[in-house]
Amino acid sequence: MCELLAVAWERPVPFEALVERTCRLEQWGIAGFGWGVAWQDTTGRVRVDRGLGRFQDEAPGRAALRSATGTRFLVHLRRPNRLSTVQLADTQPFPDGDHRAFCHNGYLERAEAHRPVYAGVLSGAADSEVGWAYLREQLLAGMGPEAGLAAVDETFGGTANLGYLDATGALLIYSRNPMNPMWNFGVVSEGIAGDVVATSLHSADETVFDVVFPDAVGRRLLPPATTMRVDATADRERHQDCSHPTAVPHVG
């Protein structure tokens, strides 16, 4: 029941440009039980900062985020299925040193069946970390991240919106949570174009654009089981042909 936000800028932008939008995403979404931000810094490393409370209360005062500047940002705002998992070990995005980071919105149905396989590397109790352990294993074995995200969904079932960022600059989104569809659109901050993917506030309408991204252009709903590379260099071409929004399908 989390919210995800992925942004790729065409040139480095301070994270400050996303703080107000992220606060509104948390306020209107189903979140407030932990937060995390992963970004690729100007040296190419993947950095992660996380907290256990509300983003709006904690993140604006974090020194690491105040100084964060980059072209790739991945944000996770948490509302876990089990409140007993509100602990740092289960707070996302999960980092892998300064190489990559991963996050998940939904529920991985077969996570407990796979948990014993990864017991030696797990620190928390959430289903998402089991999916992360599986993905990391596949990546280290040579699988590409696009195939890896799809493999997480195929292996674990359930509902899966997934986010991934690595030190090559690959910012990927996998969309297949019917309760929280994902939108792709463009924004501009201080004259710099950004390619954005965001969850829809668990709301079967377009409220996310009314309350968080009123300046969005070229909005399009990602089809189920879609892996998308969020890439600002393709932003202008991608969005210029998407002037008419696609309605969010009613769920439930």
Image: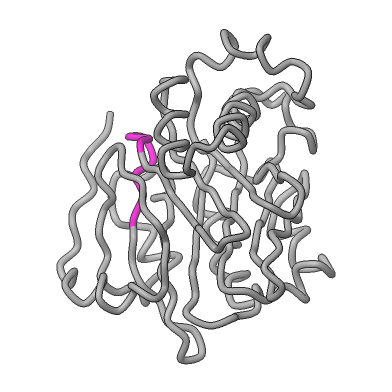
Visual colour scheme? one colour
Quadrant where the image shows the C terminus: top left
Please check the rendered image and state whether residue 18 is part of the magenta-colored stretch, yes or no: no
Left or right: 71, with 181 as reference point: right
User: Would residue 67 appear left or right of 44 to someone viewing this image?
Assistant: right
| Extreme residue toward the right, this view | 63
Give percent across and percent down for residue 39.
64, 62
Front residue of 153 and 97: 97
State the residue in front, 82 or 5.
5
In the rendered image, the vertical position of residue 31 relative to residue 228, given as above or below: above
Residue 84 in percent (x, y) is at 74, 23
In the image, residue 88 above or below residue 16? above
Q: Which quadrant of the figure has residue 226?
A: top left
Q: Position of residue 75 (x, y in %)?
A: 59, 55
Q: Residue at point 47% right, 80% down? A: 10
Tell me what residue is drawn at x 32 percent, y 34 percent: 178
Q: Is residue 179 magenta?
A: yes
The majority secondary structure of the magenta stretch comes to: loop
Which image quadrant for residue 37? bottom right
How many discs mark residues in the rendered view? 0
How far across and how far down the image is residue 174, in percent? Answer: 40, 43
Left or right for 72, reference 238: right
214 in relation to 87, above or below? below
For image coordinates 28% across by 50% down, the residue present is 222
First to last magenta residue range: 176-183
Q: Residue, x 41% and y 67% (percent of image)?
A: 231
